[in-house]
Image (spheres, grey):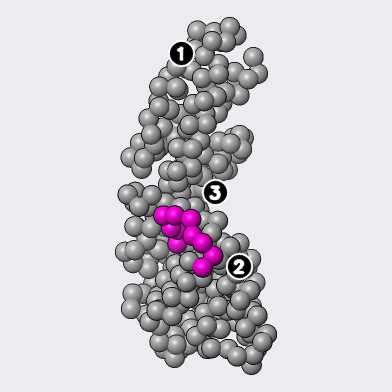
Amino acid sequence: MSLKHNKLRNTGLIFELLTQNCILELQTDPTSTPPALQIVKKHFKKGTELRKELNLYQVLSEKTFSKVLSEDQCREIIRKTIEHCSVDRRKLHNELYNLCGELKNVYGLQKFFSSPVSNYKMQASINQLIEGTLSNCKDIKSIETVMMCENYLMDDIKTRKHFDLNKKNIILVENKNDEQKVVLNKVQRTLLIKKFEEKYKNMLPEQKIIMKNIFEYNVDELNKKRRELAKKLVTFKNSEKVDSVLKENLDECKKVLRKKIDTVNMKSIGQKLLYSVELIKELESL
């Protein structure tokens, strides 16, 4: 039998859709517990097969590494991650059946699965890769599908941001605690970014990127931008067009941007990064 993507059996996709519904429900009624969150707490609690498989999806779609990986290393990581995942497939199918039954009662399956998901291709690829690997498909079409999904995932892994082993990723650390924090963390970040974009819609594109990196605790990208802006500020040091007020602001920004950004000082220095972008624009217009 040929390998086909079944949305009803895609744990990662269902979780993403529940997260999106949780965001919408919180926006509609911030005072009550969203039905989507209640479903997550009930069906994705610790010890369930759904939770175990969700962890597998999240490792394959989000995990970053401390160094650039070769194609062979990526392939080995993908295959070993899937093979060593201790999910009872029979119990998982029963849990998915019960979950989809509740989704049908609360939302209606057609309506629930009709919402677009930004990383749909990633979730579908992981689903087909898991099903194809564990079912040991033999037919040519299924083998081609598995190889195509594996290649897509490898390309994604190779382009992911790499992290410093000595630094903690705060978001990932918080997500380890329980199923409620997993979804709430994503919801809170998404809501925060949306509110910020509405309030500061006139921000420069460069400033929006800085804010996104602050929300995502992307220290490496912030430090890269800090060095870039510091170099630009130096070029205006001896400009005759710079008055005393601008010179004072210029010196203050240069002083602050000498400090390396970490998770403790990120917000305070991040504010200077935002101001530096405006200052540079003003200096360039003189």
Q: Amino acid at mark 3?
A: Lys
The residue nearer to you, when weighing 231 against 25, is 231
Q: Nearer the viewer, mark 3 or mark 1?
A: 1
Q: Does residue 122 sit above or below 144 in this rendering?
A: above
Q: Residue at x 58, y 43 (%)?
A: 198
* Residue, disc 2: 152
- Mark number, residue 194: 3
Q: Is residue 209 magenta?
A: no
Res 80 quadrant in image = bottom left
Q: Quadrant of the C terminus?
A: top right
* Residue, disc 1: 248
Res 3 quadrant in image = bottom right
Mark 3 or 2 closer to N-term?
A: 2
Q: Residue at x 55, y 56 (%)?
A: 159
Alpha carbon separation for disc pair 3 and 2: 30 Å
Range covered by the magenta-colored residues = 63-72
Query: Percent position (x, y) of residue 37?
Result: 44, 68
Compared across the picture, whether 217 is left or right of 149 comes to: left
The residue nearer to you, when weighing 122 against 234, is 234
Look at the numbered discs 3 and 2 and tell me whether their residues touch, using CB distance below 8 Å.
no
Task: For mark 1, give the secondary structure.
Answer: helix
Q: Amino acid at mark 1?
A: Glu
